[in-house]
Amino acid sequence: MINSNEIIDDIANKEYEFGFTTDIEMDIAPPGLNEDIIRFISAKKNEPEWLLEWRLKGFAAFKKMEFPKWQHFEMPALDLQAVSYYAAPRKKKQLNSLDEVDPELLATFEKLGIPLNEQKALTGVAVDAVFDSVSVATTFKGKLKEMGVIFCSFGEAVQEHPELVKKYLGSVVPHTDNIFAALNSAVFSDGSFVYIPKGVRCPMELSTYFRINAQNTGQFERTLIIADDNSYVSYLEGCTAPMRDENQLHAAVVELVALEHAEIKYSTVQNWYPGDKDGKGGIYNFVTKRGICKGAASKISWTQVETGSAITWKYPSVILQGDHSEGEFYSVAVVRNKQIADTGTKIHHIGKGTKSRIISKGISAGHGDNSYRGLVSVGPRADNARNFTQCDSLLIGNQCGSHTFPYIESRNKSAMIEHEATTSKIGEDQIFYLNQRGIDSEKAVALIVNGYVKEVLNQLPMEFAVEAQKLLSITLEGSVG
Amino acid sequence: MTSDMILPFYQALTADVTALAAQVTVPSTDAVQSIRRKALERFTAMGLPTLKTEAWRYSNIQRYLKEFPYELLNNAAPVAPTVAQQAAIPELDCYRVVLVNGHLQADQSTLPEGKGITIGAMSAYADAPGFVTYFNQQHHLETESLAQLNTALFADGLYIELAANTVLDRPIHVIHVYSCTAHSFIQPRHLWVLNRNAAATIIESSVHPETTAVAFANSVVETVVQENAELWHYCVQQGEDSFREVSTTAAQQFKDSRYHHFSVTLPGTPFTRNNTSVALNGSHTETNLNGLYITNKHQHVDNHTFMDHIMPDCNSNELYKGVLLDDSNGVFTGKILVHQEAQKTNAFQQNNNLLLGSKADINSQPQLEIYADDVKCSHGFTAGQFSEESMFYLRSRGIGEEAAKALMVNAFSHDITDAIHVPALQHFLQEQIAEIMNN
């Protein structure tokens, strides 16, 4: 049997495989955060006046706020003035088809395994690729258009569907929500926009791929998904970044709006660069994600697999406003080396008969620190609300930490709330059982971890479940308890 | 940290530090005075808790502090023996200690006597070895501003020390009488030390004689359970309308020791906050924290627990159950901290609530903070209603709705009452619960 210390060293020394950089001509704004840069971004993107004003309001709110102090990790010193707030692959001319996209860029996405090429897109997934802060290509546009589905970059949506953007932007995550949301409101550069019209079931998975490439930039994208009455959409985002010594900030905002009987399924496979084994470099992933089930019997489901980032700090939330609406949160968070994850969800039960389900699986290895922080609140109107929460933590090695900080608030006597959390390591008896059936310890751990996270991975669309499974086995390679 | 609303009270507390310190010279050793000074500094730095203080986010203590201009009360008003009698538990064969505002009333008490038993007023034992070693040593007290206030300003309390191998033959019933003629803020302070292989059962109750004056007790009990010693510690809280209470229990356990803590809060006092913390300074210990709160009207009960697993191979169990009637509020915060050295820890925590009142609410924060890998830790929380099937079962057998409810509450609280190892106390509480549910 391999010595567990050696194995932990192995995990620590495992290289990040998406750490390459792409040499490409970029438009990069000078570093610094001020009103001029906001005007510059807005002008660059040819935005209407109201949006610029909204950005400036966000900036005003940002200036008044301070960094929070309640998180379970030491807040890194962030020099927001040293960050460049706009970086985009230089456009030579207006692009009409993928053939005109910079081949270097296409090669990058090829390396990442993102099928931008439409012929290759037999997988049936429409992709919007966001490189640094700008959406570079969106596939399958035509087919989606036929059904009335709008899937485009945020910038394009502002130009072509300003009424929708104006109506819903900031309606779920207001610009005053928290300091990172305020910052994002001020400087967001691009992102994805999805609108599913009434009664349409989106025929394919929609996917956005985020990549931070340039040095000293932050990525501040904004995603807005609106599912109109009786519609359905499944959306996936994936993220990678090159290896750099310094930390880069990713402060995105995602807003989901589900109207009557609509369903939104949002899945994330997050694999930003986690920093090296000493905790040097890596992405600070400080994202605000929130959905609102506005209409009756609507449903929002978050699924996340978090394996990357130096610090992951996000709480994808659901506001269950419509009667009988439903919220779900499935999460796997893996930390190793000196990674930190402080993640969880907030579910607000407001409407009658609302239901929610939270399944969170944390895995800590090396010197990683993993926290689940969540809120389940049931308002006085939410008769017969129902919540089930389960958060389990798995510890690998004795240098890591695992924490659970749930908040439960019930103001309704007919509500039923259940919460349970467990923390343990992989049992020696479990490994022994598999050993005596001829499975070596390493494979046994992989098997046990796989079983442990299965409940969450099952929620992912099939192609991504396979990807996520691979990602997990790479991340935890050789971790025998 | 302190909002403007309670500023006058806060100013009164902190304005003249020397004057306040001068008021409370007993017990008066230099060591104690120095501890008091430090505590007062810490309290002034922290201020009184507000809703923005994380540990107090669900308990609005300001509302009660600003209710009246309180006076700090440090002496005992004479109280008739019949008052303490109100807290008597029928058929309980016990020693009795009566304290009025923290001051021992020897004439009303029956103290245990014998070799190895030291019991008396804190003020008389400031030089005792147990006092010198353990007073104010439980480090969790440092983070709680009201405990610091108590350390700075306490006048007296009950000191118990059992020498090694001393086993008390009967429980000690400690009756706290809070008596005042003007609205008063009272700071009793107790220290109970069980040395190696000692064992004791201590039951606490409190009485506030019917007056119009409101008593606010901010009490601190420190308990020390040394190697292989065992302490059963019961707190029965059945106050009156004119009583508010913040009760801090800070326990330290050493190797192979057992500590069983019960807090039972029944209707009465509008505001109760119990801070219960246990520091495990030795391995192979067992800790049971049990709580039962049955609340009515606008009552607010907050149980705040902290299990600090410092050493390996320790077991802890926490079970808190609540029945919330009328418009009452329950709060439960339970933190289990497992240090990196504390391998082979088993720590379990459970909080179950029955919301029966239409405006009753519950806020719960069960927390696990774990830095060791070879551990088994879990916490669970539920809030809900009687199961309809059970109700239907009882109704179909001709049991009225109210009676069925009472029966179910009785069954619900059984997990706690059943673990009580003093039969007289167990019967007493079961009867109390039945009576509450029948009204």
Image (tube, coloured by chain):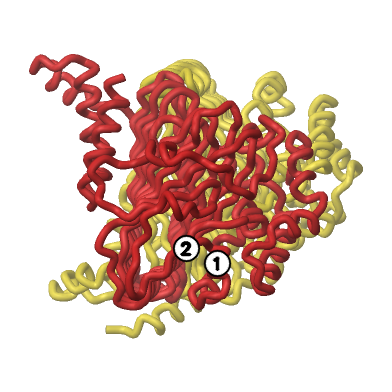
Q: Quadrant of residue A414?
A: top left
Location of mark 1 (residue)? B124
Q: For this rendering, which residue is in front, A275 or B227?
A: B227
Which residue shows up at 50% across the image and 51% down it? B275
Of the numbered discs in the image, which one, if any, rests on residue A19?
none
Amino acid type indicated by mark 1: Ala
Q: Is residue A406 above or below residue B359?
A: below
- Between the residue at mark 1 and the residue at mark 2, the CA separation in whole angstroms equals 7 Å
Residue lying at the far right of the rendered structure? A36
Query: For residue B120, which numbered disc appears in the image?
Result: 2
Which residue does the image show at 77% across and 44% down from the upper left? B12
- Residue B153's image quarter? bottom right
Pinpoint the chain carrying mark 1: B
Residue A268, position as x, y percentages in the image:
49, 46
Q: Residue at x 41, y 18 (%)?
A: B358
Q: The chain drawn red is chain what?
A: B
Tell me which chain the residue with mark 2 is part of.
Answer: B
Residue A218: in sight, yes or no?
A: yes
Question: Whole-percent x and y of residue A97?
Answer: 63, 40
* Amino acid at pointer 2: Gly
Q: Residue at x 70, y 70 (%)?
A: B34
In the image, residue B78 sits, relative to residue A326, either above or below, namely below
Viewer-side residue, A46 vs B88: B88
Residue nearest the observer in this picture, A99 or A168: A168
Q: Are marks 1 and 2 in contact (CB under 8 Å)?
A: yes
User: Could you tell me residue A442's position as x and y percent?
Assistant: 30, 74
In the foreground, B349 or A326: B349
Secondary structure beneath label 2? strand
What chain is the yellow one?
A
Taking the image as shown, residue B426 lies to the left or right of residue A240, namely: left
Q: Position of residue A43 (x, y in %)?
A: 86, 36
* Relative horizontal placement of residue A323, taking residue A173 as reference (left or right): left
